[in-house]
Amino acid sequence: MQAVWMVAASLFFALMSVCIKYASPYFGPLEIVCYRGAIGIVFMWVVLRSQKVSLRTTVPMMHVWRNVIGVSALVCWFYAIAHLPLATAMTLNYMSGVWVAAFLVGGTLLLGRLSDIRRQGPLVLAVMAGFGGVIMMLRPTLEQNQLFAGLIGLMSGLMSALAYIQVAALGRVGEPEARTVFYFCIGATLAGGIGMQFFDMHPLDTPQALWLLAVGILGALGQLCMTRAYTRGATMVVANLQYTGIIFAALFGILLFGDELPMLGWLGMMTIILSGMSATFLRARALPNPPAESH
C-alpha cells in the first residue's frame, strides 16, 4: 500500500502541473502560488483538527527560513512549468535529490573528511551523472530560446533541496509534518499575495479560475498521499517511487500539449532519474528516515 500511496502522490502532482500549465496563460506564477497556498491552508487546517495537533510552535524562525526557500522554489517551479515542456520542468525540479547529495559531499569536503569522500565515491558519481543529464536535457531547449526558463527550473530543484534539508531539521526537533506544511501554506499565501500587488491581477469570476481550484485540491491530495506513504512505508523505497512523477509528466506533456522530446532529452531524463534514485539511496544512509518533502 505504501507504494500505491507514493505512485498516487506522483500522479496527483503531475496532474497539478497540467492544471498549472492550463492556468498559466491567465494567471501569473505568484497568483497561482497564492491561491495554491490559500486552498492548502483550509485543507491542512482540517488535517490538524482531525489529528488534534496544536498550531503553536517553539521554532518559528525555522519555519520562516523553510518558507523563504520553499516558496521561492515553488515560484521557480511554476514559472518553469509555464515556459518549458511539462516533462522537462518536472525533471529539473525532481533533481532536488541530486542536489542534496551534492550538499552532503560538499559538507564532507568542508570538514576535511577525505576518507569519507573515498567511501562516498558512488555518491560523487551520482551527482556528476545528474549534472550530465541536465546538460543533455537543456541542450535541446537552446534551439527554442528556453535557456532562461531552464535555468529557473534548475533553481527550483536547488531550492527544493534546501527546503528538504530544512524540513528534515524541523522533523529532528519534533515538529509534526502537518504543522510544517500548514505554515508553509501560510507563507505561500502571504508571499504570493504580496507579490501580486506589483503585477497585474486577474479576475476570478472566469471559467479559467477553476484551474486554480484544481491546482489547490490536487496539490493537497498529493501532499496527503505522499505524507501517508512516508510515514507508513520504507523511506528509501517510497523516495525512489517519487520519480514516477516524471514519467506521468512526460506522458501528459505528449498527450495533452504535443510536447516533443528528442532522443537526447529522453536520455538526459533517464540519467537524472537513475542518478536521483542512486542519490536517494545513498542519502538515506547519511540521513535515515527523513520526513516527507513538502511540495
Image (cartoon, helix red, strand yellow):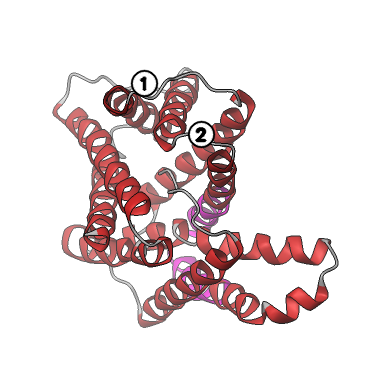
Q: Quadrant of the N terminus?
A: bottom left
Residue found 73% across the figure and 63% down from its top: 106
Q: Secondary structure at mark 1?
A: loop
Q: Residue at x 51, y 43 (%)?
A: 73
Question: Residue 201 shows which numbered tag?
Answer: 1
As displayed, is residue 211 above or below residue 156? above
Residue with the mark numbered 2: 175
Please state the horizontal and vertical placement of residue 128, each as a whole percent of the image: 61, 76
Residue 39's disc is none
Q: Amino acid at mark 2?
A: Glu
**Kind of element beneath mark 2:** loop
Please give the range of residues in magenta.
131-159
Tell me if residue 17 is in the magenta stretch. Answer: no
Give 119 or 232, whichever is nearer the viewer: 232
Q: Is residue 145 visible?
A: no
**Residue 247 image offset from top left, x and y in percent:** 28, 67
Magenta portion: prevailing SS class: helix
Q: Nearer the viewer, residue 237 or 202?
A: 237
Q: Nearer the viewer, mark 1 or mark 2?
A: 2
Q: Amino acid at mark 1?
A: Met
Determine crowd level at label 2: few under 14, some 14-19, many 20+ residues with C-alpha closer than 10 A. Answer: some
Q: Residue at x 55, y 52 (%)?
A: 161
Nearer to the camera, 274 or 33:
274
Question: Within the magenta stretch, is there residue 135?
Answer: yes
